[in-house]
Amino acid sequence: MEEMIRAENLGYQYGSAGDMRHTALRGINLSIRPGEFVAIIGHNGSGKSTLAKHFNALLVPTSGTVTVKGMKTSDPRNLWRIRQTVGMVFQNPDNQIVATTVEEDVAFGPENLGVPPAEIRRRVREALECVDMVEYVRHAPHLLSGGQKQRVAIAGVVAMRPECIVLDEPTAMLDPSGRQEVMRTITRLNRDEGITVVLITHFMNEAVQADRVIVMESGRIVLDGHPRKVFSEVETLRALRLDVPQVTELAYELNKEGAGLPDGILTVEEFADAIAGASHESRAMEGAEDGRAHPMSIVREGADPARDRRAKNSEGSDRAGCRGRAATAWCGGG
């Protein structure tokens, strides 16, 4: 299968030869496959946004090469086709909205590509359906919320029919509700439409939704793998001044106290299942030591974990304050 994006020994420096030059990227080797959802994280100045701008030739390498479906970004003859293949969405949606209605704004890109009017109307409709904004087709963009504006900006890129979308911190200026709206849109485009997604983000709960996480530091890739593998490296990420998902950190701290939870817990649901499993095992062992079988040690045919969790939730509110004691008490587990 042909690679969507490939970087080989990529290096980039800001500044002209006569000025003080700053090296932003150093020896980057990277391959992104069609249909992949890749998140790139790193603290400010790590080089992640500079790398993203190489993926659709907004920047070209100082050294090494970047290719998009086999086309070198450094060759000016490839520029038009590369930017049709890879679309960019930036941090501030206000900087990408150019028209007075949502419909006109989404149509702007296809119009500039010379797409026939009937095809433009079809693309606008389909793009707005992809981002769940059809009902706002006649609205003025400046009256929309931040999350809605960003979804319109994404629709404008989708209408140009790219095979890959690179999003450079698209949720950084949004409130939690707006971030959720945009992330639902991004995951839908990747999983339902098959669009390759490269997401630059500071939010770890966004990165865990990707197929793959790349961690950058000082212009280099220091970690690259499945979110479960990358976020298991808690101490490494801390040393790089990066956070991990809160639930991952809680599981890590519990394991330091001997909890025996699996590595790489990423979601609240996984954490709840792991705690329940550890608690069941602990109680079963206590029952065995007492010479009797504890009810929780019996494996039931057709057990329904979701039903069990609902039953546990109905026991009362006396465990509501458990969260603050979890690192020492396992929510009543001792």
Image (tube, rainbow, N blue to C red):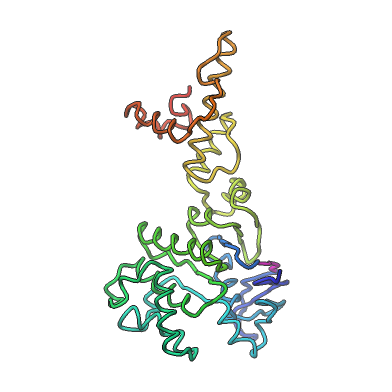
Asked whether 170 or 257 is in front, the reply is 170
User: Where are the magenta residues, as a range?
Assistant: 28-32
The answer to whether 174 appears left or right of 16 in the picture is left
Please give the name of the residue rendered at 51% of the width and 32% of the height, measured from the top-left corner. 275
Q: Judge by depth and name the residue closer to the eye, 180 or 204.
A: 180
Q: In this figure, what is the number of numbered marks? A: 0
Look at 63% across and 48% down and name the residue there.
229
Residue 256: x and y in percent read 58, 33
Give the vertical position of 260 relative to 36 (above or below): above
Task: Between residue 209 and residue 116, name the one nearer to us.
Answer: 116
- Assign the N terminus to one quadrant of the image: bottom right
In this rendering, position of residue 166 left or right of residue 318: right
Q: Is residue 31 covered in magenta?
A: yes
Please provide percent x and percent y for residue 218: 62, 64
**Residue found 68% across the figure and 74% down from its top:** 11
From the viewer's perspective, is 310 left or right of 198? left
